[in-house]
Amino acid sequence: DAGVIQSPRHEVTEMGQEVTLRCKPISGHDYLFWYRQTMMRGLELLIYFNNNVPIDDSGMPEDRFSAKMPNASFSTLKIQPSEPRDSAVYFCASRLFDGNTEAFFGQGTRLTVV
Amino acid sequence: TQLLEQSPQFLSIQEGENLTVYCNSSSVFSSLQWYRQEPGEGPVLLVTVVTGGEVKKLKRLTFQFGDARKDSSLHITAAQPGDTGLYLCAGGRGVQGAQKLVFGQGTRLTINP
């Protein structure tokens, strides 16, 4: 398996534009997590899915953020409209049902909003 | 408010020294994991501890889970430059145990040759 795949690796956009980040989890994994990492706040959990269903979105900062998982092999995180304070590295991770197993992370998407 | 507090946030020591980093919380966790992150990459799992008081060793790294399952420590013996990186602890919480995985802010470790 190629691991968790995220795209794009880097995204530079202007304030007010819509941004869509993509994630392909490892095949067979039941859980998918979206995190945001900044120097100030560390690695924050935004939302996570179980079997394609959103379980906890309490970490989503504002209504400008939305996430979907239309099927077991694809998820998106959308920001509309984007703001400079959204600049961060966004990670997607997946893991098997057993909660004590490893969470496998993608390489992240570095988002810069200017 | 950070659910998991890591200390120190930054640590720079000489090769060959020993060090300990801490991960503390007021909450009980089903499990505690330690990850290491390199620049430009996602975190990679080092170890998972599940039982209160559990100790696990990974070569020169020793991990301990507190008796009350609220805290953990990572001890490195004879640190090497290859140990440099961001060390993150992560706690599992959820209705059925460890579904929700939350991270501490991390300890940025630098080992100088």
Image (cartoon, rainbow, N blue to C red):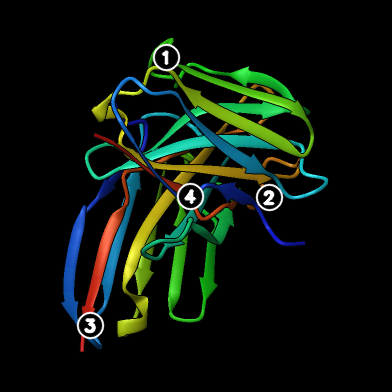
Q: Nearer the viewer, residue A52 or B91?
A: A52
Give x and y (percent) for residue A106.
56, 52
Separation of marks 2 and 1 at Cα, in angstroms: 32 Å
Kindly identify which numbered label has been placed on residue A64. 1
Residue that mark 4 sits on: A108
- Chain letter of mark 1 equals A
The mark lying in front, picked from 4 and 3, is 4
- Mark 2–mark 1 CB contact (< 8 Å): no
The mark lying in front, picked from 2 and 1, is 1
Separation of marks 1 and 4 at Cα, in angstroms: 20 Å
Q: Is residue B99 left or right of residue A97?
A: left
Q: Nearer the viewer, residue A3 or B78?
A: A3
Q: Quadrant of residue A69?
A: top right
Separation of marks 3 and 1 at Cα, in angstroms: 47 Å
Separation of marks 2 and 3 at Cα, in angstroms: 31 Å
Q: Name the residue type under label 1.
A: Arg
The mark lying in front, picked from 3 and 1, is 1
**Residue ranking furthest to the top:** A63
Q: Determine the residue positioned at 42% across, 14% down.
A: A64
